[in-house]
Image (tube, grey):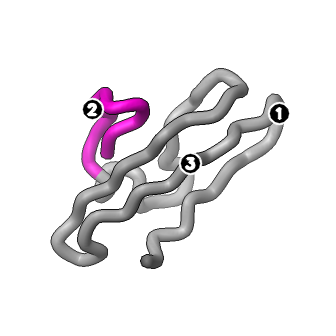
């Protein structure tokens, strides 16, 4: 998974309860490339004190 073109880890590492990445509030470009889901690109806005979930659908 890439956030603003910077590698942050593999999607499988986040596929469990409690898995996630802590980011400062703001808008991010997210790119996920996986055998199961293909390539997914999203622009995601993260708000303070809220959980943001990115669905892995095309």
Query: Which residue has dot 2 on it?
Result: 7
Q: Position of residue 18 (x, y in %)?
A: 55, 49
Report which quarter residue 16 is drawn in: bottom left
Instruction: Please identify, in this view, whether the residue under mark 2 or under mark 1 is nearer the observer.
Output: 2
- In this rendering, would 20 be left or right of 13? right
Q: Which residue is mark 1?
A: 49
Q: Residue furthest right?
A: 49
As measured in the structure, the alpha-carbon distance from the residue carrying label 2 to the one carrying label 1 is 24 Å
Q: Which residue is mark 3?
A: 43
Given residues 50 and 33, the one toward you in this image is 33
Q: In the image, is 35 to the left or to the right of 18?
A: left
| Residue 3 among magenta residues | yes
Is 35 on the left or on the right of 57, as rendered?
Answer: left
Residue for point 37% across, 63% down: 40
Q: Is residue 25 above or below residue 45?
A: above
- Helix, strand or loop at label 1? It is loop
**Alpha carbons under labels 1 and 3: distance apart:** 19 Å
Identify the element where label 3 is drawn.
strand
Q: Which residues are magenta?
A: 1-10
Q: Earlier in the sequence, mark 2 or mark 1?
A: 2
Relative image position of residue 21 (x, y in whole percent): 51, 36
* Residue in front for this viewpoint, 22 or 33: 33
Callout 2: SS: strand
Q: Residues within 10 Å of mark 3 (few under 14, many from 20)?
A: few
Of badges 1 and 3, the one in the foreground is 3
């Amino acid at each position: 998974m890439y956030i603003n073109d910077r590698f942050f880890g593999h999607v499988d590492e986040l596929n469990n309860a409690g898995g996630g990445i802590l980011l400062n509030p703001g808008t991010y470009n997210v790119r996920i490339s996986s055998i199961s889901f293909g390539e997914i690109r999203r622009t995601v806005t993260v708000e303070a004190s809220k959980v943001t979930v990115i669905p892995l659908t095309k």
